[in-house]
Image (tube, rainbow, N blue to C red):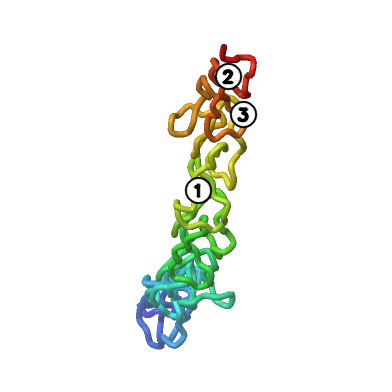
Amino acid sequence: ARQSECKECNAGFLCPVGASSQSPCKAGYYCPGGTGESTNLLACPAGTYSSETDLSSDDQCTQCDGGHYCEEAGLTEPTGKCDPGYYCTSGVNSKTPSFTSTGTGGQCQAGYFCEEGETTAQSCPGGTYSDTAGASACKPCVAGYVCPIRTASYQENPCDAGFYCEAEQSQQTPCPPGTYNPDTQSTEYDACLSCDAGQWCSEGQSSPNGPCSEGYFCSGRSTSPTPELIDEGGPCPAGSYCPEGSGSPTPCEPGFYCPNTMQAAHDKTHICQ
């Protein structure tokens, strides 16, 4: 039987003049119902692509993959990877995306870095920094400073007095007990000074905590006002006395004796007979 009329081409197919059957809409394009000549094909827009045939609308086109860009219309695969210094999350049409680009992407900001093909900006790890936008790598933190995560400028974080900071540090290193450091921006352990005789120093101090307690002596590098370790000092021995802030025991004066330990002052009641 002879057909009495022609049928409209189905969505997702192409029917040129004189066609006796439908042809699939080619990859990278979409064909609404009634599409005729190949010149009437509608391309998947920039920022998208399609490796599939038979598409009927642009919402069936695939958003450009993360880390990639789709520069032109009618693509069957992404154009390439996003440039270093930039990130391409999805649907991007430029290798250096900006506010005028399609999809989601942009330039890495200070404190972040982006290698080639990144989907999101990466935080500079602790011990590094990035002081410019569009960085593809972070720089090592400078000695005398610390760089916490996402540092944009190392100069904002100088090392405090009482601490020292070697290169590539994310946190300050405190001077150990028995030492102190009055200076900022110190770069090495040698900046920590031995606690003065007659004084004591806890961890991370810019100056000694205070004088040694009466009845004790602090010979240097003392970590307590009442030291017990031999190399730091100790309780005042019999035969001597130790007022507050003593760096060493003071012997009893001639003609007197000091029978007690931890004596804070000279006891002149004990006269030699």
Which mark sits nearer the N-terminus, 3 or 1? 1
- Whole-Å distance between the Cαs marked 3 and 1? 24 Å
Camera-side mark, 3 or 1: 3
Along the line of sight, which residue is nearer the eye, 218 or 43? 218
**Residue 237: in sight, yes or no?**
yes
* SS at badge 3: loop
The numbered mark at residue 193 is 1
Quarter of the image with the C terminus is top right
The three-letter code of the residue at mark 1 reads Leu
**Residue 33: in sight, yes or no?**
no
- Whole-Å distance between the Cαs marked 1 and 2? 38 Å
Location of residue 134 in the rendering, given as x and y in whole percent from the top left corner:
50, 73
Which mark sits nearer the N-terminus, 1 or 2? 1
Location of residue 158 in the rendering, given as x and y in whole percent from the top left corner:
56, 58
Q: Is residue 38 left or right of residue 184?
A: left
Residue at image mark 3: 243
Judge whether 152 appears above or below 40 on screen: above
Camera-side mark, 3 or 2: 2
* SS at badge 1: strand
Q: Residue at x 41, y 81 (%)?
A: 15
The three-letter code of the residue at mark 2 reads Phe
Residue 25's quadrant in the figure?
bottom left
Quarter of the image with the N terminus is bottom left
- Whole-Å distance between the Cαs marked 3 and 2? 17 Å
Camera-side mark, 1 or 2: 2
Residue at image mark 2: 256
